[in-house]
Image (cartoon, rainbow, N blue to C red):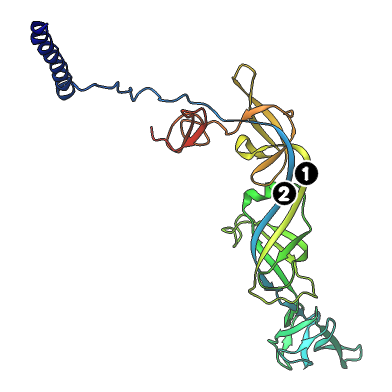
Amino acid sequence: MGVWRTWVFPIIRILIFAAIAAALVKVAFFPEVSEVPDPAEPGAVIVEPQIMVERGTVSNDIQLSGMVAADAALPAKSTAEGKIRSIKVGQGQSVAEGDVLVVVWTEMLRDNGTSWFKETLVTAPSAGVVSSLPMVVNQYVSVGDIVAQVAPSSYHVSGSLQPEQLYRLLEQPTEATITIPNGPAPFTCTGLTISTPLAGGDDGANGPSITCRVPGDVRVFPGLMAEITVAGGIAEDVLVVPTTAVEGLAEFGNVYLVLPDGTTELRPVVLGINDGVMVEIVEGLEQGDMILQFIPGALGDGGVGFPGPGGGCYEGPTGEIVCEDVVR
């Protein structure tokens, strides 16, 4: 019994120490090398986000920044040739529409060689303030000469439109809602017009603009900033999809329909109004159809679902869809 203990226990201790030493040598000189993934191979499955066609409401309101301005002065023109006999008003004077501003005398000849003077009245074209009187008494004028300018006591609001916003106006609006910060309650501005610069005109560098009249009972001042809201219509309980899913947003477009086998098909659609985020589908799709949420190629040169400069979408480690910028 004493001999067994003398030889066996030392041998066990030696074996244990040898195993520990071997483990230490492996850790120190032969570390475990993990497999490095090939950078040429994608680390996640690339997918294209899909969305279901559903029903909803689209309110086509266009909001613009604008400014209040006084209406332009109106010219009072002579309708006769002759000399100014008298001037009935002074510059800065308030007048009513039809008030006499200037009297023009035209010399007329009789058959017997004598003459007489025909009196022509030049009246105010509108109510307002006489802003200019460029003529003097006894000055000769011709037909069409401007003898005075009257600045009307009326105002308008104008703002600039982006050319592409014209596509959202399916019908010509006639009014807008005006909100003036720290001013009166929002009011309706009527007589709305949309002007587009003519080719070769002096304002050819500017885009389309919108203008409407301020009601006479609303107190405003030139230079006030205003928010213009143009109601382009509302569509309720209609098929809607995100604008990101549609190629073209005016009248006709294309979407990418997802087929049962997972492939996609280019599907032409007829479009209604849009609010810049969602667009109405009039024809071409049914409720419940699945389409691509983004037009292929819209987020980057590699297309949606294909990493490239500008972005890509892929399935994350827990199954979620991740869209981010990925530099190839």
Q: Residues within 10 Å of mark 1 (few under 14, many from 20)?
A: some
Q: Can you identify the residue that label 2 sits on?
A: 60
Tag shown at residue 235: 1
Rounded to the nearest whole Å, what is the CA distance between mark 1 and mark 2?
8 Å
- Quarter-of-image position of residue 52: top right
Point 71% across, 52% down: residue? 61
Q: What secondary structure is found at the residue carrying circle 1?
A: strand
Foreground residue, 14 or 188?
A: 14
Q: Position of residue 63 (x, y in %)?
A: 67, 57
Outermost residue toward the front? 1
Q: In the rendered structure, are the residues bearing label 1 and label 2 in contact, judged by CB atoms less than 8 Å apart?
A: yes
Foreground residue, 232 or 213?
A: 232
Q: Residues within 10 Å of mark 2 (few under 14, many from 20)?
A: many
Q: Quadrant of the C terminus?
A: top left
Q: Position of residue 46 (x, y in %)?
A: 48, 26
Specify the amino acid type for callout 1. Answer: Ala
Of callouts 1 and 2, which one flags the residue occurring earlier in the amino acid sequence? 2
